[in-house]
Image (spheres, rainbow, N blue to C red):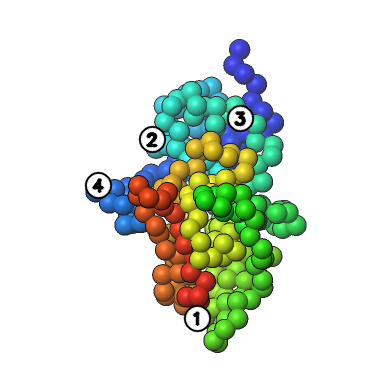
């Protein structure tokens, strides 16, 4: 008899998707890549076979659309991730609803979660200053020459010359980098702070974090912040690499 499916598992979540990645990677560093990713719905008629460990209808790797976990190429581990793992504590889960778009599902979910904290964003630095807390909080505005950047925590919006609404994980990433501005933040640090339930588990890889960084860069440029506020530092034998948020470039 197959193991019992938990009361909440990814197989029942609206954000279980197939990920078609056509990104050109040959000879390129992560920051040089132009992500070309398409997400496909996993309809109800394909979810039932998956529960029985039948993935024959699946053409592309399964992932979490909200970024909780990414591709798993080991078949047994994939089934554990998708079907067997208990997700009752997952703050981003939403029941699968046939015919509902991802955008509507996210809006419905966010309304229910509006009074909850969706990500841990306290400032932490890991490296030479491991686990040292940095004083300071994200304020509602970053003042300076007009216009000014306005941050709305409730709506997850940034406003400068125009306004943009961010995905929960991208907004949490923005706040985390801003609090730690002008410091090198490694991918591991980002992973452990934004996905604390999966610390050091390797469930979220560098490329996926880079995709969230890319989405944040695009959002900042869309509201008129054209300069390269988020700098990528490549790995070398001298440092782990990561990202630096240059707060002094917001003008």
Distance of label 3 from label 1 (alpha carbons): 46 Å
> 246 and 126: which one is in front?
126
**According to the image, label 3 marks what residue?**
85
Residue at 58% across, 40% down:
199
Residue drawn at x 65%, y 52% as measured from the top left: 120
2 or 4: mark nearer the eye: 4
Is residue 194 in view?
no
Q: Secondary structure at mark 4?
A: loop
Count residues near mark 3 (Cα–Cα under 10 Å), then give few for <14, some for 14-19, many for 20+.
Answer: some
**Quadrant of the image containing the N terminus:** top right
Closer to the N terminus: mark 2 or mark 4? 4
28 or 86, which is in the foreground? 28
Q: Is residue 91 visible?
A: yes
Q: What label sits on residue 133 in the rendered view?
A: none
Q: Which residue is mark 4?
A: 26
> Could you say where residue 175 lies in the image, as x and y percent from the top left?
59, 62
Where disc 3 sits, the SS reads loop
Nearer the viewer's eye, disc 3 or disc 1? 1
**Mark 1 near mark 4, Cβ–Cβ under 8 Å?**
no
- At 57% across and 62% down in the image, what residue appears? 180
Corner quadrant of residue 18: top left
SS category of the residue bearing label 2: loop
Q: Which dot marks residue 251?
A: 1
Residue pushed farthest bottom?
146
Query: Closer to the observer: label 3 or label 4?
Result: 4
Tell me the quarter of the picture where residue 160 sits: bottom right
In the image, residue 246 sits, relative to residue 78, either above or below, namely: below
């Amino acid at each position: 008899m197959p193991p019992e499916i938990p009361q909440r598992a990814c197989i029942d979540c609206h954000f279980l998707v197939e990920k078609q990645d056509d990104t050109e990677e040959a000879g390129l560093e992560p920051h040089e890549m132009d992500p070309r990713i398409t997400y496909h719905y996993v309809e109800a008629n394909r979810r039932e076979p998956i529960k029985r460990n039948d993935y024959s209808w699946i053409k592309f790797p399964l992932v979490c659309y909200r970024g909780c976990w990414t591709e798993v190429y080991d078949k047994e581990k994939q089934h554990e991730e998708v079907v067997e793992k208990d997700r009752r504590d997952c703050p981003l889960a939403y029941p699968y609803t046939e015919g509902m778009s991802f955008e509507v599902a996210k809006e419905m979910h966010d309304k229910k979660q509006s009074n909850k904290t969706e990500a841990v964003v306290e400032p932490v630095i890991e490296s030479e200053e491991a686990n040292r807390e940095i004083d300071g909080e994200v304020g509602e505005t970053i003042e300076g020459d007009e216009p000014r950047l306005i941050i709305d925590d409730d709506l997850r919006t940034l406003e400068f010359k125009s306004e943009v609404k961010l995905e929960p994980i991208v907004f949490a990433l923005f706040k985390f980098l801003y609090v730690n501005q002008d410091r090198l933040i490694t991918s591991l640090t980002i992973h452990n702070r934004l996905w604390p339930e999966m610390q050091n588990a390797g469930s979220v890889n560098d490329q996926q974090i880079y995709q969230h960084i890319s989405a944040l860069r695009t959002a900042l440029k869309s509201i008129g912040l054209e300069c390269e506020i988020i700098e990528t530092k490549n790995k070398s034998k001298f440092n782990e690499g990561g990202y630096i948020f240059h707060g002094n470039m917001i003008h």
